[in-house]
Amino acid sequence: MEIADADPVAHQKGCIVANTIVEMSFVDEDLKQVAVEILKETETFYREIIAKEQERGNICSKLPAATLARHLITFWCGINSLLRMYPDKNTLRTQIKLNLELLD
């Protein structure tokens, strides 16, 4: 929930990795590939942690860890757009909570 409490000016910066993929894909293929690799590494990290926590019973979702990991990547990239549209804390908290409920 920390992102919901961040300085609204910080919201306007977004995520450099997500921004690179969206804005530089047609300009610099090498830079795009670096950004894609960073997100794929993050996805792998999420997948491994989610799978472990599912085995331990700390994440109850029956969705596959890989699906949940990709959802978190999608959410992260999307939240940066939402932050620009609705920089108020209540909207952000609601959306963050909704997305985290998928892990429950």
Image: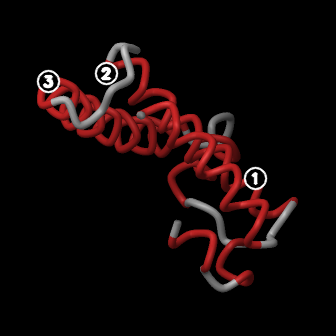
Q: Amino acid at mark 2?
A: Ala
- Label 3 vs label 2: CA separation? 10 Å
Q: Disc 1 or 2, which lies upstream in sequence?
A: 2
The type of residue carrying mark 1 is Ser
* Quarter of the figure with the C terminus: top left
Q: Nearer the viewer, residue 58 or 10?
A: 58
Q: Name the residue rendered at 71%, 61% in the picture.
A: 92
Binning the other alpha carbons within 10 Å of mark 1 as few (below 14), some (14 to 19) or many (20 upward) gives some
The residue that mark 3 highlights is 55
Return the x and y of residue 80 as percentages of the image width and height.
Answer: 67, 56
Secondary structure category for the residue under label 3: helix
Answer yes or no: do the residues labelled 1 and 2 have beta carbons within 8 Å? no
The label shown at residue 65 is: 2
Quarter of image, res 65: top left
Q: Which mark is residue 81?
A: 1
Select label 1 or label 3 by which is in front: 3
